[in-house]
Image (spheres, rainbow, N blue to C red):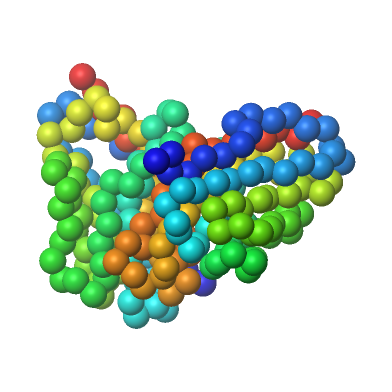
Amino acid sequence: AQTVTQSQPEMSVQEAETVTLSCTYDTSESDYYLFWYKQPPSRQMILVIRQEAYKQQNATENRFSVNFQKAAKSFSLKISDSQLGDAAMYFCAPNNAGNMLTFGGGTRLMVKP
Amino acid sequence: NAGVTQTPKFRVLKTGQSMTLLCAQDMNHEYMYWYRQDPGMGLRLIHYSVGEGTTAKGEVPDGYNVSRLKKQNFLLGLESAAPSQTSVYFCASGALAGGPTDTQYFGPGTRLTVL
């Protein structure tokens, strides 16, 4: 079974600054994907970024990038130029061979104007 | 293209009552999933389906049943609701595992309260 740990229950960042959210996981899978989902107060789950575990290059989507360390089983999310709309819960989730996601407990990100 | 839709959005039940949550997707995805999210926690998988007519148990299946009679629909049933089933329920769909689009797409959620 997979386990996912997000060690930061809450994080705060000043608008326009950079913040990094941490995620570590444990898996026996050799090939898998990793995802960061954002959940704003509307509770809709929104995909932020995804990473294929077999790729060494870190994924980037506009202001969002990841630092993927496969050997360490670490998958952190960096948000640059933080905006008020980035305030939300963020969940890290690896999948398995059956494409089932295991979610971490989440990190609540607050953005200060 | 509506993506993933869920019916209803809110529901209040009394202990022992039954209900069915409906999930529909228009993306022709093979895989569909039901998750629950309790306050302050991440989502946990209840049941999933890898294709029409097939279902399987996830992490927390007790007290729930599912059916996938049509590819586009995935139903979650509670036969005898209990207060411990008070939660927000999310449906998701995704393409075949291992394919180029392994992303799961989520519905808006159903908030269920069991009194």
Q: Is residue B13 left or right of residue A62?
A: right
Which quadrant does the N terminus of chain B fall into? top left
Residue A85 position (above or below residue B100): above
Picture quarter containing residue A14? top left
Front in this rendered view, residue B82 or B70: B70
The residue that appears at 19% across and 71% down in the rendered structure is A55
Q: Position of residue A83 (x, y in %)?
A: 20, 28
- For the point 32% across and 62% down, the residue is B101
Q: Nearer the viewer, residue B61 or B98?
A: B98
Residue at the (48%, 63%) spot, across then down: B30
Residue that sits furthest to the top in the current view: A113
- Left or right, residue B7 beside residue A99: right
Numbered label tally: 0
Asked if one can make out residue B111 in the rendered structure from this viewpoint, the answer is no
Question: Against B107, is A95 above or below?
Answer: below
Residue B26 versus residue B56 in the image, above or below? above
Spot occupied by residue A102 in the image (x, y as percentages of width and height): 47, 60
Q: Residue furthest right?
A: B16
Res B30 seen here: yes
Query: Is residue A4 left or right of B79 when viewed as pictured?
Result: left
